[in-house]
Image: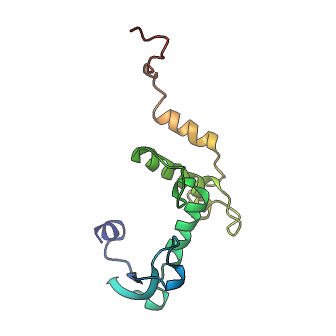
Amino acid sequence: MADIEGAFGADIDYAMLNKIYGASSDSTKGRYSPAECIGCRKENIEGDPDMKHVSTSYAERANLTMRMHNRRFTRLTNAFSKKFENHAHMVAIYAVWYNWIRIHKTLRVTPAMAAGLSATVIDWTDIVEAMDADAPAKKRGHYKKTADEISN
């Protein structure tokens, strides 16, 4: 809740939908499947939200889109990040691509352009140049010695 208030203050209509899960039916036992949603509870958190529009559809669609575009988020995969830091970097790269580079069919522009944050489509060259200007590449350190270089 502190994040919501920090971003929007008290001037927001905010509600939460909590799904209630229970054991799945006998027909799915023995297979990999999540628990079954047996109900929902809507809770008013801040302001005066229209409770008939409280839903998880947008969040679930965003999660599915992320999983479909990024193998690190698909279930039961071997495309994982060994370090959390690398995982966070991949999420940031995905967010830049999705919002600033990818032209969405329904919008016919990037979301950044639709929101008025950019006047043109940005490509990866622009992103890399901005990164290099912010923090120029440093000289790489020494690599681990190869077996030929190791003397016993």
User: What is the quadrant of residue 48 in the picture?
Assistant: bottom left
Q: Residue sitting at 62 percent across and 43 percent down?
A: 124
- Quadrant location of the N terminus? bottom left
Nearest the camera: 119 or 45?
Answer: 45
Nearest the camera: 129 or 67?
Answer: 67
Q: Residue sitting at 53 percent across and 55 percent down?
A: 95
Looking at the picture, does residue 108 appear above or below residue 128? below
| Residue 142 locus on image (x, y percent) | 43, 19
Q: Which residue lies furthest to the bottom in this view?
A: 52
Looking at the picture, does residue 124 appear above or below residue 70? above
Total marks shown come to: 0
Q: Can residue 99 be seen in this view?
A: yes
Q: Is residue 91 left or right of residue 1?
A: right
Q: What colour scheme does the image use? A: rainbow
Looking at the picture, does residue 18 appear above or below residue 122? below
| Residue 28 locus on image (x, y percent) | 53, 79
- Quadrant location of the C terminus? top left
| Residue 41 locus on image (x, y percent) | 38, 88
User: What is the quadrant of residue 141 in the picture?
Assistant: top left
Looking at the picture, does residue 107 appear above or below residue 101? below
Q: Residue sitting at 40 percent across and 47 percent down?
A: 84
Q: Residue furthest top?
A: 151
Q: Residue sitting at 65 percent across and 56 percent down?
A: 102
Q: Is residue 71 left or right of residue 55?
A: right
Q: Residue furthest left?
A: 2
Q: Is residue 109 left or right of residue 60?
A: right
Nearest the camera: 79 or 53?
Answer: 79
Q: Can residue 47 be seen in this view?
A: no
Nearest the camera: 111 or 71?
Answer: 71
